[in-house]
Image: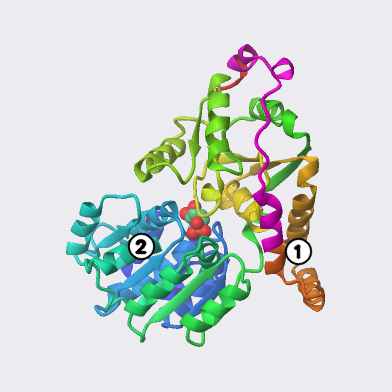
Amino acid sequence: MENFNSFNLSENLKKSLKGLRFTKPTEVQSKTIPFAINKEDILASAETGSGKTAAYLIPLIQQISTNRKVSGIILTPTRELAQQVADVAKLLVGYKSGINLGLLVGGASMNNQLNQLKKYPRIIIGTPGRINDHLLRKSLSLKYFNFLVLDEADRMLDMGFGEQVDKIVEYLPELRQTLLFSATLPKEIIRLSKKYLNNPKRVEVKDNNVIKSQIKQKVVNTKTEQKYDELLDEITERKGSILIFVRTKYATEKLKTRLIRDTVKSSALHGDLRQNKRNRILEDFRKERFRILVATDIASRGLDVPHIEHVINYDLPQVPEDFIHRIGRTARAGSIGEAVSFVTPSDSRMWRSIEKLLDQLKNPDKKDRDEDRDQDRGQNKNQNREKNRDNNSNNKPYRKRNRRNSKSRKFYKKTSK
Ligand code: AMP
């Protein structure tokens, strides 16, 4: 697919795509858009970084611009992803189209959302909890929303939104088009797709963007008590923005405080912060007002901050799939990025699972063989996932810093930005 012309898009959309400098559709876009414009249901396995947002927004906006009876609702697992989708949607819709958008996420002003709803938005983007709040208080009617997108469906289920999504779907017309995007396709997603999708077209993006793109990987074998000093070394060696992943909300704040004390300008992002604070932190990070963001896995999915050059896995994730999402935060849209992972002896089991997953993504045929073998042994992927979670649920508390061996603050004052 050379360019977007073959999709017969509206002039308005063509102009917006030009403004965004999207000249060539990505793989997921060229596979999804023709079916979606044709009103087919779609089950797509694609991750953030593949261009999936435009893959569903372009057909939705195309349909809305040509058919007054189409309205779309997009469900995302996190508020940040919803905001990001809304930003892209605004750009694609353009200022002159007269198509209103509604962004309905938790932690944001209800009044503002009620005002948005009074304008009868034809595209609603939101998180399941807040959308259900509106449905219950009858400030939102989904009677005419006949285009549904479930974005990052696997993450939505992981976060326990299954029931909330079910409730929302009950309010939607039965005659509708549904697009489901998921990075992984475990059993639960297949079940969900059977429930919600009608004879869907299957879209598979073979080249995993994260693996294929230019991410250099570095592994630092270390001990828990040495991790902080190793981290300071990594920060000093690197230029540009760094996203550091830790396991718990508490650990983000703790590490941020420690870095600030050592004069490394940084901020922390986690689910306990109020939404406007989360937005402000992300905005400041995007605008490069500080260089280092310490985050929980809340930041591992969906965030599109093009200038992140380094991802540091200070703690490994709880499930191997999150590793792929984390490192996908760097090397966005073809840029070069680097991922560093700290691996302590107690991480060895998780690290092996991550290596196995990376290997499977690089060699999909081998993955099929492995899965067949696993099924024979009655060990499906979900069981492994649960096991990994259990193994990691007894998070060890952070050990106190060994001050004697720590790098001096003065030293870092000179080297960090
Ligand atoms: P997504 O997977 O939707 O989060 O998109 C990942 C990144 O790719 C975003 O920064 C998009 O702006 C960018 N992108 C999406 N589609 C295209 C395209 N056709 N050409 C160039 N960049 C794109």
Residue at coordinates 54% horizontally, 62% vertically from top-left? 155
Is residue 18 positioned above or below 339 on the image?
A: below
Q: Look at the image and give the residue range highlighted in magenta.
A: 386-413
Instruction: From the image, tell me which residue sits under label 2.
Output: 125
> What is the x, y in percent for residue 167?
38, 74
Give the residue type that dot 2 points to: Ile
Is residue 235 positioned above or below 78 on the image?
A: above
State the SS at label 2: strand
**Quadrant in the picture for residue 145:** bottom left
Residue 122 appears in the figure? no
Q: CA distance from mark 2 to mark 1?
A: 33 Å
Which of the two discs, 2 and 1, labels the residue nearer the N terminus? 2
Give the residue type that dot 1 points to: Gln
> What is the x, y in percent for residue 311?
62, 41
Q: Marks 2 and 1: CB-CB under 8 Å?
A: no
Instruction: From the image, tell me which residue sits under label 1.
Output: 360
> What is the x, y in percent for residue 382?
67, 68
